Amino acid sequence: MEETSKEAFDTAIQRVAGMLQRSDQLDKVEQYRRREARKKASVEARLKAAIQSQLDGVRTGLTQLHNALCDVKDIQNSLADVSKDWRQSINTIENLKDVKDAVVQHSQLASAVENLKNIFSVPEIVQDTQNLIEQAELLQAHRKLMDLECSRDDLMYEQYRMDSKNTHDMNLIGGYFGQVQSLSEELAKQLWMVLQRSSLTVRQDPTMLVSVVRIIEREEKIDKRMLDRQKQTGFIPPGRPKCWKKRMFQVLEGTVSTRIEGTQSETRDSNKMWLVRLLEITRKYVLDDLIVVKNMMAHCFPPHYNIFRVSFHLYHVALSTRVQELATDELLEANEIVSLLTWVLNTYKSVDMMGHPDLSSECDVNQLEPLLPQSVVDDLLGKYIQTFTSNITGWLRKALETDKKDWHKDTEPEADQDGYYQTTLPAIVFQMFEQNLQVAAQINEMFKEQVLMRCLVQMSQFLSRYRDEVIAYKDEHLKDRQLPQFYVQYMIAMINNCQTFKESINSLKRKYSPCMEPTQNDAAIERTLNEVAKEGCQFLLDEVFLDLEAHLNELMTRKWLTGSHAVDTICVTVADYFNDFSKIKKPYNQEMTSEAHRRVVVEYIKAVMQKRITFRNAEERKEGAERMIKEAEQFKFLFRKLSAGEDTDQLCDAIAALAEVFKLTDPSLLYLEVSTLVSKFPDIREEHIVALLGIRGDASRDMRQMIIETLNQNKPSVSSNSQPIFKDITVPTISMTAMTSMTVPKLLK
């Protein structure tokens, strides 16, 4: 206490010191004193209130404890009185045992008297019940059966209460009512028969179905009552619980399964379309049955049965079991796999079946489990892809063999609406692809793209075989150029097929997979088609130049100089061939014309470089040069006509440029003329110039050496617009050795 007072005193001194730190604060001493007095009074008031509250609580607690003590004493007195009364009544209870036995016996006899009428008339009631069952009067039959069972159960229950271990009397009662159980079973058979034919019964006699449901409901209530009594007494009558409601749903499940299994009326051996017919019949039956259940049967059952939802689920389970059996059939063909998967993945949940407007208001098809597990679907898709690949390989091989036979026909190939030659091969191939893609599209988008990719892979492999067959066709023709009769026309058709293949592939990709990214396989197909077309054009040009070979050999010879018609014949022959080549589609016809033009010019220049003639004098040089310029103009006119007016002069200008070298009369100006030639055609080589100078016949070895060395010192720049002509033209080595033995670099650039 002293410490507290001291602590309070010290605190007060600190507060006063804090208030009076400046002299001007002395004027407020009275104000500070009143404020501290108010605070003190407030604290004292709160303290008094807290102490008073605690005292009131203690007083209340003591009062309650006193009351509790009094209550405990009263209870103890009451318990003592109860114990005393219980000890006094033990003897009285033992004296009432005889009364208890008499009450039980009276209850048993009362039950017997109550059921006396039924007991004596059991055989008659059994016979009446049997007759009613046979007459399909099921409600009345069940009423009599209930009376019999009630009499039996009451008697057995009273016997059980009197002496539960007396099996002899229990068996005696059971034996007397022995036919009741058989009647119950017979009635049950009739009920299940009606339920099995419920779809037909509800149309013809719905009251019969209602009676069946009422009987089942009665039995469910009796089962519940008997089970409740068993919990209290331990007694359960024989045959209980019957569980007819559970049995009813089992019967409905079996009926649905039988209905689904009974839809197959044909086999694969009797009809190739057996599966399509089976699935369509199943769809129709299931839809019809469910509509009947929703619109008619649902009114015959209590709402809590949810008969439509139950039936919907039963059909789904039965269908799932059935389609899984079909899916595991090892003999399923590719078209059957597609039919099954299309039905399972698309038709089943569509408006044509489970998603029908008449059914959708009750059940959501999107909540249904898949009919087939995804693993089974994947296995079927894999099996289809494998079978499809094998089939498409065979179909493509057969189509190519058929097309090869057409190549040897004695008639021209057919032409399309634009007059271009073609064969039926592209149409046949892409008709096969189109049909399979249409089928795949019925399943789902992913599978459609897989089939498209497989088609393109097969197409790439097929085009490699096609290319080999085209080459073999050319080789066979070269053995006897008279056969086949329309070799050129069919080769043109093969070239056009390449363009048709390209267009058809792009069409398929746009139609069935517009978002597909280009793949390596696409590049391989494009490359192979270009190679086939390019080689086909090359084979046709080879055919042309085989006919021109004799006339090309006349060029730059004495016969040519004196008046040969070789170039006239060449132009006529080329023009004749190009009448057929006009049936080649773009862009191949343009490439064909350009290549023919190039080969004609190259062959002409080759004839020059082979030094078949050496001019003897200026007159011959002039005559030869003029003839070359004239023939270059002929080629220009020919290929300008074949190229539909396009610029084709540059190649022919090479012939005119060589002619200018021959036409020059002053040998001292040869260097300038040759320099002009080299500047126009930078790919010309030393041996070409040596050959030209040799053909002139008036250039000495020293002059040739000087021209070559000077040109080597002043190499011309290569123009990006220059078209190489001389790079593929060789000069015979013997001629080169004979003309010069100089050792100089081979290329001027």
Image: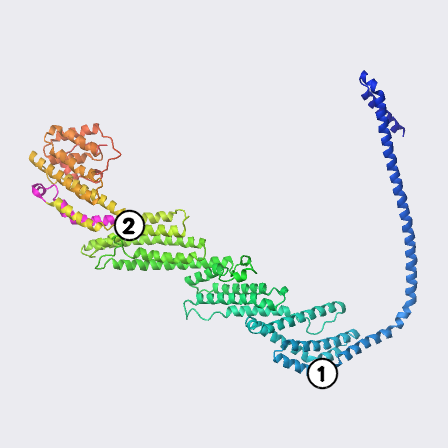
Q: Which residue is mark 1?
A: 121
User: Magenta span has 162?
Assistant: no
On residue 532, the disc is: 2
Amino acid at circle 1:
Ser
* Quarter of the rendering occupied by the C terminus: top left
Q: Which residues are magenta?
A: 536-564
Q: What residue lies at 47% left-to-right and 69% top-to-bottom? A: 264
Res. 624 image quadrant: top left
Q: Does residue 691 appear in the picture of this structure?
A: no
Amino acid at circle 2:
Val
Residue 148 falls left or right of residue 13: left
Q: What element does badge 2 sit on?
A: helix
* Quarter of the rendering occupied by the N terminus: top right
The x, y position of residue 696, in whole percent, is: 11, 35
Front position in the image: 679 or 571: 571
Q: What residue lies at 44% left-to-right and 59% top-to-bottom? A: 383
